[in-house]
């Protein structure tokens, strides 16, 4: 595993997120203020994530109650921890400023939607992005063009308005929409890279690529089976 980041640099970065200077003689009060502002910052993203998750769950309930088949199998939400956020700030050389973090880091709030078929991933994305209060900021289609390591998923960054007691804000939320096979592969790949701290042996990397290809073949075969079933139903 990689070495943990020491506490002192992390505290310095967190202090830098807040405007003004920290008075050494009153560090406890200053740190409380930092914590209060960071809690408010995270609340914005938590609320944005819940807004989008509610939209997804409404679609899911609608299909379950009115249709024979629902495209959404599972939904999982994730709010990036402060440790993960600080680590990412370091990786992309983001200055310790809340305005800069809001502008440059758009995956603080994340939602993963798992579907049975490839066709459903695009269908869910289309249903969500045509809603008038969601703004599509970015699309990365790793299904049509997988990453070099074999990773496949449809990534969207959407922006949703959040209405608080004293203001309204637009919050970016990352959506990852993938099939069950893609999700299973990504879960295993994540565990392997975590275990080896990113330095995965070549033989395991090749094995992951091979399994990614197998997962893609499975998705294609299942899609063909569904098409055949549909054609039989209309005969």
Image: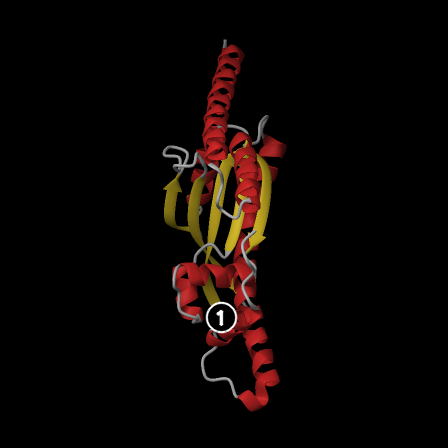
Is residue 96 something that shows in the picture? yes
For the residue pair 32 and 199, the one nearer the viewer reads as 199
Residue depicted at 45% across the width and 83% down the height: 20
Figure check: 219 above or below 75: above
- The answer to whether residue 165 is above or below residue 190 is below
Vertical placement of 29 versus 147: above or below? below
Q: Nearer the viewer, residue 203 or 151?
A: 203
Badge 1: how crowded within 10 Å, few (<14), some, or many (20+)?
few
Identity of the residue furthest to the bottom in this view: 25
Q: Residue furthest top?
A: 235
Query: Does dot 1 land on a helix, a strand or a loop?
Result: loop
**Depth check: 149 or 218 in front?**
149
Return the x and y of residue 18 as percentages of the image width and height.
Answer: 48, 77
Which residue sits at x=52%, y=20%? 222
170 vs 56, left or right, is left
Where residue 106 appears, as percent x and y from the top left, is 43, 56
- Where in the figure is residue 14, as x and y percent of width and height? 51, 72
* Residue at left offset 46%, top offset 75%: 16
**Labels in figure, total:** 1
> Can residue 132 be seen in the rendering of this structure?
no
**Residue located beneath label 1 in the image:** 167
Q: Nearer the viewer, residue 89 or 109?
A: 89
Q: Is residue 56 placed above or below 106 in the rendered structure? A: above
């Amino acid at each position: 595993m990689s070495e943990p980041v020491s506490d002192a640099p992390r505290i310095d970065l967190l202090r830098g997120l807040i405007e003004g200077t920290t008075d050494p003689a009153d560090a406890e009060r200053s740190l409380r203020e930092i914590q209060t502002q960071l809690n408010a910052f995270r609340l914005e993203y938590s609320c944005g994530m819940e807004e989008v998750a509610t939209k997804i769950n409404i679609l899911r309930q609608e299909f379950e109650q009115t249709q024979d088949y629902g495209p959404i199998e599972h939904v999982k939400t994730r709010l990036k921890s402060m440790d993960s956020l600080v680590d990412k700030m370091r990786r992309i050389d983001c200055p310790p400023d809340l305005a800069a973090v809001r502008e440059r880091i758009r995956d603080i709030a994340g939602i993963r939607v798992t579907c049975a078929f490839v066709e459903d991933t695009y269908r869910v994305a289309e249903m969500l992005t045509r809603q008038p209060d969601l703004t599509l900021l970015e699309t990365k289609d790793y299904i049509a063009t997988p990453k070099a390591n074999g990773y496949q998923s449809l990534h969207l960054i959407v922006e949703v308005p959040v209405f608080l007691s004293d203001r309204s804000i637009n919050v970016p939320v990352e959506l990852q929409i993938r099939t069950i096979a893609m999700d299973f592969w990504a879960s295993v790949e994540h565990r392997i890279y975590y275990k080896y701290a990113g330095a995965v042996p070549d033989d395991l990397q090749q094995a992951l690529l091979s399994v990614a290809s197998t997962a893609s073949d499975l998705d294609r075969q299942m899609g063909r089976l569904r098409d055949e079933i549909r054609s039989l139903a209309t005969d």
